[in-house]
Amino acid sequence: MSVVRRIDPYVKSAMLAAACVAIAAVPASAKLTNHRIALGQAVGAVRIGMTRAQVHHILGHPSGGKTLEVYAKLGLTVGFFHTSNAVTVGTRNAAYTTAKGIGPYRSTLAEVLAAYPGAHCDTSNMICDLVGPTRHVTRFTFNSSGELLAVGVALSKYVSALH
């Protein structure tokens, strides 16, 4: 003999409302699953040209900064220098890599040059820039031992803001 239990309609709607609240309470940063650095374009889901509202929708609110917003727990920075759209996106988070597997704390200067022979390097400042056809730049920043510390993408006129 099977038993069928009916759930009171008020209980059912209360359970549905509670589930919706629980889903809404998950921070936007929990949705980050894209850890790809798209050369000259994006770090993860944050792309050059996004509005501040779009970035906040994806990452939540920053832990600091106004023109250069810092997302410390995610290892990301997003620059809004004299504009309402993102002009730089950078990371020091080892989870982020390019399509060729280059990323912070996992690659060296030699590996970056092997993967991207068109990169222009200034070894006195420990940086290499890869300029794309649309004047977007990917900057690789190294420590004195040649280990990759950070990768950022920017519009060419803002590339000096990447650290």
Image (tube, rainbow, N blue to C red):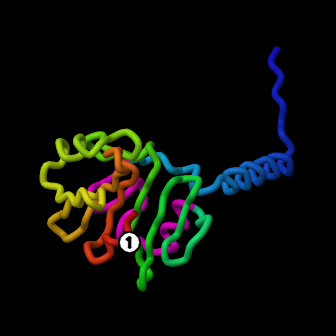
The residue most toward the bottom is 82
Quadrant of the rendering where the C terminus is positioned: bottom left
Quadrant of the rendering where the N terminus is positioned: top right
- Quick one: 11 or 101, which is closer to the camera? 101
**Residue 17, how many percent across, how many down?**
76, 54
Q: Which corner quadrant of the image does residue 135 belong to?
A: bottom left
Looking at the rendered structure, the kind of residue marked 1 is Ala
Residue on which disc 1 sits: 161
Query: Quick check: 42 above or below 9?
Result: below
- Quick one: 158 or 120, which is closer to the camera? 120
Q: Residue at x 25, y 41 (%)?
A: 100
Q: Residue at x 43, y 55 (%)?
A: 91
Q: Which corner quadrant of the image does residue 43 belong to?
A: bottom left
61 left or right of 86 in image: right
SS state under label 1: helix
In the image, the segment drawn in magenta is 36-59
**Residue 72, how many percent across, how many down?**
57, 57
- Quick one: 7 or 76, which is closer to the camera? 76
**Residue 65, how many percent across, how many down?**
56, 73
88 left or right of 117 in image: right
Query: Quick check: 139 above or below 12?
Result: below
